[in-house]
Amino acid sequence: MVDTRVDLCGITIDNPVIPASGTFGYGHEFAELYDINCLGTFSFKGTTLDPRFGNETPRIAECPSGMLNAVGLQNPGVDDVIREELPKLERVFHKPVMANVSGFSTDEYAEVVKRLDRSSMSDMIGWYEINISCPNVHGGGMSFGTDPKMAAEVVKAVRWITDKPVIMKLSPNVTDITEIAKACEAEGADGISLINTLMGMRFDLRTRKPLLANVTGGLSGPAVFPVALRMVYQTAKAVKIPVIGMGGISSAEDVLEMMMAGAVAVEVGAANLVDPYASRNIVRDLPEAMKKYGISSF
Ligand SMILES: Cc1cc2nc3c(=O)[nH]c(=O)nc-3n(C[C@H](O)[C@H](O)[C@H](O)COP(=O)(O)O)c2cc1C
């Protein structure tokens, strides 16, 4: 028998597999396909103060072993999430959920966390994952995650609002990710998650124009796995707080490799878009893979 349980910032979860924000909606959509209670937890779609329609289409482009996306944080806004999405989720998911929060100013991050934390749905939330790394929006998102001082400002703005763990989601589009991680830790962050997508672009040879209406997009999927693994390894060595690893995970073996790099849990993103059962299959395959490599617990 192997023990798949892990401790994530003081909360024990049944296994370390967490569908990543933006690839699992608000969960209830996937509950129509399978019982999502098999997951450790999941991170819901990046939520902002006001509703956002996202970027113009086309906003997805396939690449060898991965994809580019420039969705641009499409979401119904925090009030609608509290009123519509979380009550739907409550009916089908009986574990704490990770609330992914995005913003265009430190005040916006703080206000979104405040509304979720003071709402009637607050009990459903186990952790806040603060996305300071979205490469597909202008004037916010990633700009907070590429400067240690600005990253620290966001932690400072949200940390006092809630008693729940605050996990900062970092961008790989920096020279030294450990500087940003250390700045977040120093300001009181409870955990770090990484990586968000790597900035990229592609051209359509016939139109001679970029494939994405937004010109650039974020690369994710198996292509980024070695980069993500290296950054998780560096970050886990640089900070004492828990690190969630993600980027290109698509199998139970990938999970083990990410845990060996120092992650306490993992998130699975693009794989859910290739196969909606991907996260469930990884959970199913994990005990066998652990046995195969002589791992009895994490
Ligand atoms: C279509 C799409 C939408 C995403 N939306 C969000 C988001 O709203 N908030 C966020 O923090 N990350 C978002 N991400 C980033 C993923 O959560 C993850 O960090 C990244 O894709 C790397 O993991 P992967 O290679 O397993 O996809 C999105 C990724 C994709 C592919």
Image: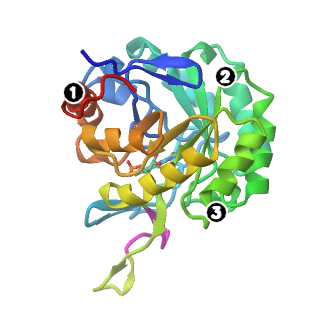
Q: Amino acid at mark 3?
A: His
Which residue does the numbered mark 2 point to in the structure image? 164
Where does residue 11 sit, x and y in percent of width and height?
54, 18
N-term mark: 3 or 2: 3
Q: In this view of the protein, can residue 141 be seen by the observer?
A: no
SS for tag 1? helix
Callout 2 crowding tier (Cα within 10 Å): few <14, some 14–19, many ≥20: some
Q: CA distance from mark 3 to mark 1?
A: 46 Å
Picture coordinates of residue 49, whole percent (x, y):
67, 39
Residue linked to disc 1: 291
Q: Amino acid at mark 1?
A: Lys
Front-most of residues 11 and 28: 11
Query: Which of pointers 3 and 2 indicates the residue nearer the eye?
Result: 2
Q: Quadrant of the N terminus?
A: top left
Cα–Cα span, label 3 and label 2: 29 Å
The amino acid on which the numbered mark 2 sits, given as a three-letter code, is Lys
Residue bounds of the magenta highlight: 211-218
Ligand 1 lies under 8 Å from the Cβ of mark 3: no
In percent of the image, x 64 and y 50: which residue is there? 132
Q: Main secondary structure of the magenta part?
A: loop
Asked if residue 269 can be seen in this view, the reply is yes
> Mark number for residue 138?
3
- Determine whether 117 is above or below 105 in the image: above
